[in-house]
Image (cartoon, rainbow, N blue to C red):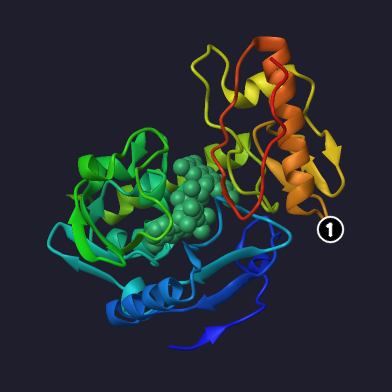
Amino acid sequence: MNLEGGVPLARFTTLGTGGPARALARPESLDELHEALRWAAEHDAGVAAVGLGSNLLVADEGVDALALKLGGELAKVEVDDELVRAGGGAANAVVLHRVRDAGLGGFEFACAIPGTTGGGVWMNAGAYGGDFAHLLERALVVDLEGARWLTPSELGLRYRHSELRHGQVVAEVELRLVPRPAEEIKATVAELQAQRKAAQPTNKRTFGSVFKNPDHELSAGRMLEACGLLGFQIGGAQISPRHANFIENAGGGTSADAVALMSEARRRAWEQYGVELEHEVEFLGELELDPLQR
Ligand SMILES: Cc1cc2nc3c(=O)[nH]c(=O)nc-3n(C[C@H](O)[C@H](O)[C@H](O)COP(=O)(O)OP(=O)(O)OC[C@H]3O[C@@H](n4cnc5c(N)ncnc54)[C@H](O)[C@@H]3O)c2cc1C
């Protein structure tokens, strides 16, 4: 297994920001994954799996960890009757394509989620009423101790949350789907994509929703819009003029710019609504939002 140094993680994040990890490994089998985890332990480095970087904000200075990009066997997709086995590094788009061709439905919601199955399990990604928790039979989680199959309840899956921690890598998932004609799946996907296009920025560099929806009558997006944040910009990062719960890289943006925008958004939501917004995007490295003035 080769280790690469100095590779900016910006290359692997949809926002296009972030400095290098201490090292980058691309394991292609369970053996290589175990080897990478042992290397990290021996070198006292943290471990961070990176999927398609679509929910990731990486510190501009980089992160003192071994970054893992799963490939090969760890990104394969196999359909076995109504059960789908996908590597944790498999892109949702590839899985969706395979299951559609196999006439299996239930994964259509993932057409809106530009990540991998591993990233999907990590935060129980979901859209349009579907999420990973509803389909997942079990996930193979690998850490220094070995490999274990865990069910959704053992993973602690709930709204945009799991109990997984860095150092635990989702190497494979098993999803239980239901028979559905490919034409119907295609039609649903087209409809969901049209809804997405009408409501959210597309063809922009973003990391999806910035904040989780609070327990409030307003969604995070509507709340930030009411705080006057549509189009608000700091440095090269801008709150989307289309949807206030998205941050776009307007050109030359850094993770620090995005964090400054997030701090400002959180401050305004707190002052106007008394709501403490919780970020949905995952932070890697030394990144912190400003504390709220209580
Ligand atoms: C335009 C856009 C729209 C989006 N819409 C949605 C949406 O509708 N619903 C939604 O839920 N999300 C949405 N997202 C966010 C994002 O796509 C999801 O959170 C996705 O599941 C992240 O997967 P990823 O592979 O890109 O993970 P990454 O962003 O690479 O990583 C996210 C976290 O998962 C961990 N991780 C990744 N792979 C593994 C693995 N194999 N094992 C263990 N941990 C892992 C990482 O360490 C990190 O902590 C959107 C993002 C974009 C850019």
| Residue 19 horizontal/vertical position (percent) | 70, 65
**Most distant residue in the right direction:** 235
Quadrant of the image containing the C terminus: top right
Given the image, on which type of amino acid does mark 1 rest?
Answer: Gly
Considering only vertical position in the picture, is 255 above or below 68?
Answer: above
Residue at point 36%, 42% (across, down)? 162
Where is residue 58, by image quadrant? Answer: bottom right
User: For the residue labelled by badge 1, is the local secondary structure a helix, a strand or a loop?
Assistant: loop
Residue at point 69%, 61% (across, down)? 18
Q: Is residue 22 left or right of residue 131?
A: right
Q: Is residue 71 visible?
A: no
| Residue 49 horizontal/vertical position (percent) | 46, 63
Considering only vertical position in the picture, is 14 above or below 162?
Answer: below
Considering only vertical position in the picture, is 265 above or below 65?
Answer: above
Q: Nearer the viewer, residue 42 or 91?
A: 42
- Label 1 sits on residue: 252
Task: Characterize the local packing of mark 1: few (<14), some (14-19) or many (20 or more) Cα atoms within 10 angstroms.
Answer: few
Q: Is residue 245 visible?
A: yes
| Residue 111 horizontal/vertical position (percent) | 44, 51
Q: Is residue 290 left or right of residue 2?
A: right
Q: Nearer the viewer, residue 55 or 44?
A: 44
Respond yes or no on whether mark 1 lies under 8 Å from ligand 1: no
